[in-house]
Structures are given as C-alpha cells and as structure tokens.
Amino acid sequence: MDTQMESSCSKTRNPFTGAEANAVSVKVDHVCKSFSGVEVLKDISFEVIPGEIFVLMGPSGSGKSVLLRDIVGLDVPTSGTVTIDGQDPSLEATRDRVRVALVFQDGALFNSLSVYDNLALYPREHRSGDEDSISQKVMHALKILSVEDAAYKFPSELSGGMKKRVSIARALVMEPQLLLYDEPTSELDPVMSATISEIIATLKNEYSVTSIVVTHDRALAQTISNRVGIIMGGELITLGTPAELFATKDPRLVDFLNPKIDIKNPRFKKLESTKPS
Amino acid sequence: MKQLNSIVEGVGSVVQLLFRSASYAGSLPRQWARFIEQCYQIGYTTLPIVAILSFFIGTVLALEAGYAMEGFGAKEFIGSLVGLSMARELGPMMTSVLLAGRVGSAIAAELASMKVYQEIDALTTMNIPAAKILVLPRLAAVLVMMPVLIVIANIVGWFGGSVVARYVSTVGISPESYFAALRHYTKFKDVINGMEKAEVFGFVVVLVCCDIGLNTKGGPREIGAAVTRAVVVSLILILVLDYFVTKILM
C-alpha cells in the first residue's frame, strides 16, 4: 500500500496537459542563517520526499519564511546547503530545469498587470505555446481556483482571499514540480482559509506536486500535511506526522499547538510592573 | 572608508546590471510593447516640460547675451551664442536634468516599490530576469528618445532666443540676422556632439535609477529614500560626466 502510494506520488501530473513528470525532492542540510551576526536559523536539516505536503510550523519570527526563501533560492544560507533534486536552487540553471513556484504571503501580484496578464507572464516569457494555448491555460487555472470572473481586474481591485487564489493560480500556470506556500491562510476568514486548504490538498491529490507550506495555522497543518516540522527560535525542534505531533506531551509544543488563555497568569508583563514608583 | 566602499559597491552593481541587461539584448524584438511603452514614458510625457524649459533657456540666453554684447557692439552674434550654448551644453544638460527628475525618479519609485512588495522576488522565482523585462526596454527607449528630445529642445530654445531678439527692445535685432548668425556659427557637428552627450547622460540616468530601485531593501519608507538617492546620484553624475564627455568630444 505504502509502496503503491509512494510510486503514485513520485510523478507530478500537468494540470493542463495531463502529462507526467518526475516530482522533485528537497534536501535541507545543516542550514544556518545569520543577519548582522544574529543567528536566525540554527543547523536545520530535513528532507521533503517527492509528492508529499510538508508543513513548516512555528511561532511568528521563528525563521520559517527565511528558510522558505533559502529553499526557493531567493537567499542563500550562511552555511549548510539546500538542494532541489540535488541542485542549488539559487542558480538560474536549476530554475531552468526545475519549475519551482512560490505563493507569497501577500500574493506579490504585479500591480501594473491585470490578473490575466499576471498569469500569462510566465508562459509568454518562457514561450510555452502560442497566445491561444496560453489563454486556455490561464483561464483553466483561474477556473480551478474559481476566480475566472476576476481575469480582467487589477490586483488592487481584489480582496485578500482573491489575491491569494490568483497567486496560487499564477503558480499553477507555471506547471510547478515544487510548490511553496508562505502563510497561505493568514489574514483570511475561516471559510476562505478552509477553501485555500482544500485547494492545496486538491492540487496535491490531483497533480501530486511536492509542496512545502509555511504556516502557523494548526487546522491547515492537521488537515493537509503528510509531515510537519516545527521551528522555534530558529531550531527545528521536531518532525513527524500530524498525528504524532498533535499527540505530543512536549510542553513547548503543547503550549504552541494548544495555547490556553490564562487571564490570572498572563504571558505578558503586567502594566503595573512598569509603572514608576 | 565606509562611503568609499559603498561608492565602489554601487559602481560594481551598476556595471553588473549593464552587462546583465546587455546579455538579453536579443530578446528586445519580442519586447516591442514594453519598448514602445517606455518610449512613451521617456519621450512623449517628458516632451512638454522639455519644450517649456528650453524655450525659456533660449529667451534668457538671448536676453543676457543682448545685455553683455551691447557693450562690444556685437549684438548680431546673439544667434551664435544661443545656438552654440543650446546645442552643445544647455540642451543636453537641462534635458538630462529633467529626465533625472521626471523619468529617473519614476523609474526608481516603480522598481523600488516592486522590490519592497516582493514583485521582483516573484519574477526571480519565475526565472524571469528583472534586467531583461524591466531594465532593457528602458535602456533601449532612452537611447532612441534622447536624440529626439534634444532636437526638439534645441529648436524650441533657438526659437525662444529669436522671440527675445525680435521683441525685446534692449536686444532688438531682426530674426533674419539672429538666425543668420546661428546658422553660420552652429555646425551640424555641434548638434551631434550635444546628442552624443545626451545619450550618455540619459543612459547613465536610467541605468543608475534602475539599479537603485532594484537594490532597495526594507519597507515602504525606503521607496522615498530610493527616489531621493536616485535623483541626487543622477544629478551629480550628469555634472561630473559633463566635463569628461565634453573633453572627449572636443
């Protein structure tokens, strides 16, 4: 059963042509990252196997997004290596060979282009087909994400949820072998968060794209992930299946995953203590 | 020492950007729409202000020349002074200064905003180089539009001088003698020299403003700082380059 599942997961299926391609693996090996002497990532190592959804969780400021930027090749680690299918993601040659798409936290849509042109930019620049086939591809991606009505709107005319969906559609048009999401459900209402979670899970189930999701949304991690890693203070403190992780007794994780609101003993310093005597 | 380092870094970054952009020159025919859009931004939208400024530079030159040359009885040569000054120096320089203020600041603001709001990062992940689609069309457009702007600046400036020569009583020479002197002393080579200068200034202004925009780091406040830096650096470079380019072209 496992072997069957793994072999079905090792190929990505092109959402537009149905053609199969090899899903890619990601290896993060002893990665450290410092900014002006401050260590943000401390010796992080893990591997993402082809076709899985790997979720990185952690409190705000723990270094998740920094790690994501290293994985996608926007930054390079201070020490250690990140490889996608054995290749350095920061090199243009690797980006030529492996299609990696990143869904940014704020969408990062091109404000001067319409939604349609945002999606068409990649296939146009990489000359993947004539204008007719690009148009079909773009409209198909928008339809998958249920935002086809927004095709000729500009990003400034879209709501937060629509921007996120358009951003995912733009990633989809790239026919990615590796899809990374940075806080895909942040700033969204619960219904829209659930919709985005369903979309991520569907993309994985239908097209078996290797996915890395950075989030602190517990429900999202529990629902869609194959494995979850938790980063705290720049360290990867645990790695496991969602079931293992959410059953943990580790007090740091329990406090992070099931925070209790304690009004009598608040986490923040009481205002009285800062008052001058 | 720190400032020297940042100057060397800046020069290195601009040179790198120039070579990166040049390496995509072959893609320019496929970027026709972007090129035309930039020609419109750099040429057409700058034209009215260039025309107004050049007209008044011409008028002031003629007025000052009229005052100064009256003592020598050389008022007939006002046309030559306005013609040569506009063609060789003031036309290219003032047009480039306007370009830095109007187009350079807009380029720096747009690219800095794209950097701050991660649009440049999005391009990188899509393997679409910013140098190819954001810098190259602008560099090509400025090379095409600068000579056009200079020709118009010269013509309007010369015309401005002739208006003063004709209608201001303290100057009081006929347009015929004004243009005769202008034609006699202003050679085609002078106009070409001015265009060459303007090409260098315009190219450097756009390249530097693109580089400053693309290297913006931090939040929205940095966008304003990038625009200020882009304009100040452009103005300094225009004045410094003016000396060297003039020396080379002599």
Image (cartoon, rainbow, N blue to C red):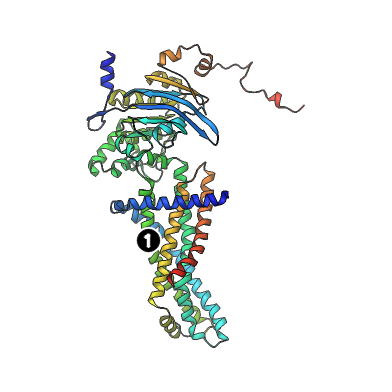
| Image position of A57 (left or right of B66) | left
Secondary structure category for the residue under label 1: helix
Q: Position of residue B49 (x, y in %)?
A: 46, 64
Quarter of the figure with the C terminus of chain A: top right
Foreground: B86 or A16? B86
Foreground: A141 or A146? A141
Q: Position of residue A21 (x, y in %)?
A: 25, 29
Quarter of the figure with the N terminus of chain A: top left
Foreground: A262 or B188? B188
Q: Position of residue A135 (x, y in %)?
A: 26, 40
Foreground: B161 or A230? A230
Q: Is residue A162 visible?
A: no
Mark count:
1
Rendered residue at 42%/22% (across/down): A220
A132 shown above or below A255: below
Q: Residue furthest right?
A: A277
Q: Position of residue A161 (x, y in %)?
A: 41, 32
- Look at mark 1 in the image and give the residue it sits on: B143
Q: Chain of mark 1?
A: B
The quadrant holding residue A141 is top left
Badge 1 amino acid: Leu
Q: Is residue B193 visible?
A: yes
| Image position of B66 (left or right of A52) | right
Q: Residue furthest bottom?
A: B73
Mark 1 neighbour density, 10 Å: few (under 14) some (14–19) many (20 or more): some
